[in-house]
């Protein structure tokens, strides 16, 4: 896949467009002289893998959520109307590529019917995916199902946007075509096949089903639509059941292997993954989560979402750490929690003035390099000693493989959709969430009867626990937390004034504590850098800043350049 992607660059230059207005580029490659064989179609379609950035952006780096906090607070994606936005332009540029392929395939005489249907399915799958990204960001938009011509398509180029529900129905039609017609490469885990198509369909339909159930007219959106919600939740279940019933996938025994493997080939959990191989293709997620650059650490709020591992589901505790070798350690605290926490954070707290050495050539600390975190909780999830010290702390030199679609996410999607439909039972639980907790090492199964007094979602205890399970299983992953809060209509949970624990980190003690781990007052006298702490001794990484919720943030603003090009495009509420 990497070699194909690199070779593809020379081809794709000819087909790249800046916006949806362009006709065929005046270049050496055109629709008529390039799309002449199945090999060329496959080469062209491999570009679509760039939709998934893997460890170069889809994991850890998206910190607009309540799981991670940076020093100074991450603000909303847009605070004011931008002049231009890649979130609008890039999907439409890629939609044009899809339509180029869709229009070319029927004219390729050398293709068999099965090949033509397969590649048409891939093109329509990706057309659905790119439109979904636009709808998720902007709501009403344009459904573009052919290569636009400025002389013939004024209704699209200069007309008003289409209702987002109508666009989503067209997306569903493309998805259903894709899952029925993509028939090749069923055993591969690095190319598009029917299971990848169903995984994408499951994500999109879960998003739409829950979004339509929880949206609100008070926020400038349409009223909830229960019929529509049930339709899409049912479609999500259908897609998940294809994967679950195939017999081709199972959880890998070790949770961390999903994120720290040098090669995910043969991993039974993978539906689609991105393969890295240094020096041809590398990533920086290890370097950015445990190098000299300060890590955007886990929040206090997220830390306390991990249940205790001793069987007492209500023992969360803000219990404090202890000194180990002169360093504040939370190892004992982690040992009492869900075992996934031990995969997600370091046992030794790390913060300004108390850096932790993770990189060294030997036990004596030769060539040591330290790490520090904005919240005290170091991000451990992606690190592995299978890569040498130099490459682990170097940009672009990591080569652990990145999951794109994998079975754990299908389990979570299926459990949630079934619960939303009122069909979550012992069979569904045993097929999905019990397996996730057993794999993680918990001594109990999933409980659907826990009543958590911290339930601030406005949903049943069952749905709250399923949402908690999703949060813990997918910590730092694929920006899932932000878009889950959006589809659940709970972006208000990102307001740092209303929910101060999302800008706080670990307890490190205050000058008033008799058994403090870190003497802030002494550090000040010594001139040592140290983090801000609140009156209770928790790190406050906000630097006095706050992220204030406004209902307009459910949708991105339409960029001003698009309004200049087309005054009929309008603007989203509140912008």
Image (spheres, rainbow, N blue to C red):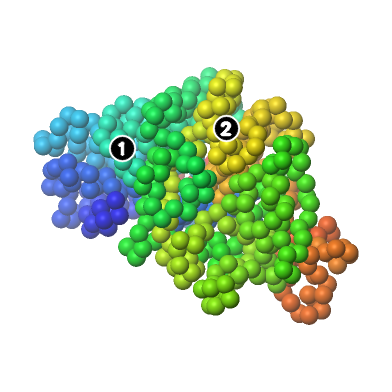
Badge 1 vs badge 2, beta-carbon distance below 8 Å: no
What residue sits 34% from the left and 36% below the top? 125
Q: Which residue is mark 1?
A: 187
Image: 24 above or below 454:
below
Report the side of 48 relative to 568 (left or right): left
Q: Residue furthest left?
A: 109
Q: How many marks?
A: 2
The kind of secondary structure element at disc 1 is: loop
439, above or below 58, in the image: above
Could you say which is closer to the camera, residue 104 or residue 142? 104
Residue 358, by quadrant, is: bottom right
Coordinates of residue 438 in the picture (x, y in percent): 58, 37
Q: Residue at x 59, y 22 (%)?
A: 426
Q: In the image shown, does 127 or 144 lie closer to the viewer?
A: 127
Report x, y in % for residue 37. 14, 42
Where disc 2 sits, the SS reads helix
Badge 1: how crowded within 10 Å, few (<14), some, or many (20+)? few
Q: Which residue is mark 2?
A: 433
How far apart are labels 1 and 2 at the CA level? 26 Å
Tell me: 453 left or right of 187: right
Q: Earlier in the sequence, mark 1 or mark 2?
A: 1
In the drawing, does residue 455 fall left or right of residue 146?
Answer: right
Q: Is residue 287 visible?
A: yes
């Amino acid at each position: 896949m990497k070699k194909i992607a690199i070779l593809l660059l020379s081809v794709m230059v000819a087909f790249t467009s800046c916006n949806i207005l362009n006709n065929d580029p005046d270049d050496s490659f055109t629709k008529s002289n390039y799309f002449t064989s199945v090999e060329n179609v496959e080469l062209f379609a491999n570009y679509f893998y760039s939709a998934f950035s893997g460890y170069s952006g889809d994991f850890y780096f998206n910190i607009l959520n309540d799981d991670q906090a940076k020093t100074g607070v991450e603000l909303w994606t847009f605070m004011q109307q931008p002049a231009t936005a890649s979130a609008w332009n890039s999907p439409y540029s890629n939609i044009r590529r899809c339509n180029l392929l869709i229009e070319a395939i029927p004219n390729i005489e050398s293709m068999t019917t099965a090949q033509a249907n397969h590649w048409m399915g891939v093109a329509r799958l990706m057309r659905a995916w790119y439109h979904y990204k636009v709808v998720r960001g902007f709501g009403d938009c344009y459904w573009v199902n052919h290569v636009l011509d400025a002389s013939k398509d004024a209704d699209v180029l200069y007309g008003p946007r289409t209702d987002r529900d109508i666009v989503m129905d067209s997306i569903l039609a493309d998805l259903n075509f894709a899952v029925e017609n993509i028939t090749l490469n069923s055993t591969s885990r690095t190319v598009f096949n029917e299971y990848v198509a169903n995984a994408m369909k499951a994500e999109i339909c879960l998003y739409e089903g829950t979004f339509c159930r929880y949206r609100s007219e008070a926020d400038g959106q349409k009223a909830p639509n229960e019929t529509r919600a049930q339709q899409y939740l049912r479609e999500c279940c259908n897609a998940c059941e294809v994967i679950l019933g195939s017999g081709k996938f199972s959880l890998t025994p070790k949770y961390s292997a999903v994120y720290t493997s040098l090669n995910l080939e043969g991993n039974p959990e993978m539906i689609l993954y991105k393969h890295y191989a240094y020096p041809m293709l590398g990533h920086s997620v290890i370097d950015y989560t445990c190098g000299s650059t300060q890590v955007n650490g886990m929040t206090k709020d997220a830390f306390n979402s991990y249940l205790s591992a001793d069987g007492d589901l209500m023992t969360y505790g803000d219990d404090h750490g202890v000194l180990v070798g002169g360093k504040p350690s939370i190892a004992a605290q982690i040992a009492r929690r869900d075992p996934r926490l031990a995969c997600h954070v370091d046992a030794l707290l790390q913060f300004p003035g108390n850096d932790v050495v993770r990189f060294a050539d030997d036990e004596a600390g030769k060539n040591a390099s330290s790490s520090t975190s904005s919240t005290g909780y170091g991000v451990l999830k992606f690190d592995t000693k299978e890569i040498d010290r130099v490459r682990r702390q170097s940009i672009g030199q990591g080569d652990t493989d990145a999951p794109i679609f994998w079975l754990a996410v299908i389990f979570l999607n299926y459990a949630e959709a079934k619960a939303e439909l009122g069909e979550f039972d012992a069979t569904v639980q045993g097929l999905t969430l019990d397996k996730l907790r057993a794999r993680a090492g918990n001594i109990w199964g999933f409980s659907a009867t826990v009543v958590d007094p911290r339930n601030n979602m406005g949903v049943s205890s069952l749905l709250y626990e399923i949402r908690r399970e999703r949060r813990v299983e997918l910590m730092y992953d694929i920006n899932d937390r932000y878009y889950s809060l959006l589809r659940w209509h709970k972006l208000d949970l990102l307001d740092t004034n209303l929910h101060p624990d999302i800008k706080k980190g670990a307890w490190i003690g205050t000058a008033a504590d008799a058994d403090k781990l870190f003497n802030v007052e002494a550090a000040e006298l010594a001139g040592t850098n140290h983090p801000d702490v609140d009156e209770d001794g928790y790190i406050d990484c906000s630097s006095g800043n706050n992220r204030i919720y406004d209902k307009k943030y459910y949708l991105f603003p339409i960029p001003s350049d698009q309004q200049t090009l087309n005054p009929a495009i309008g603007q989203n509420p509140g912008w």
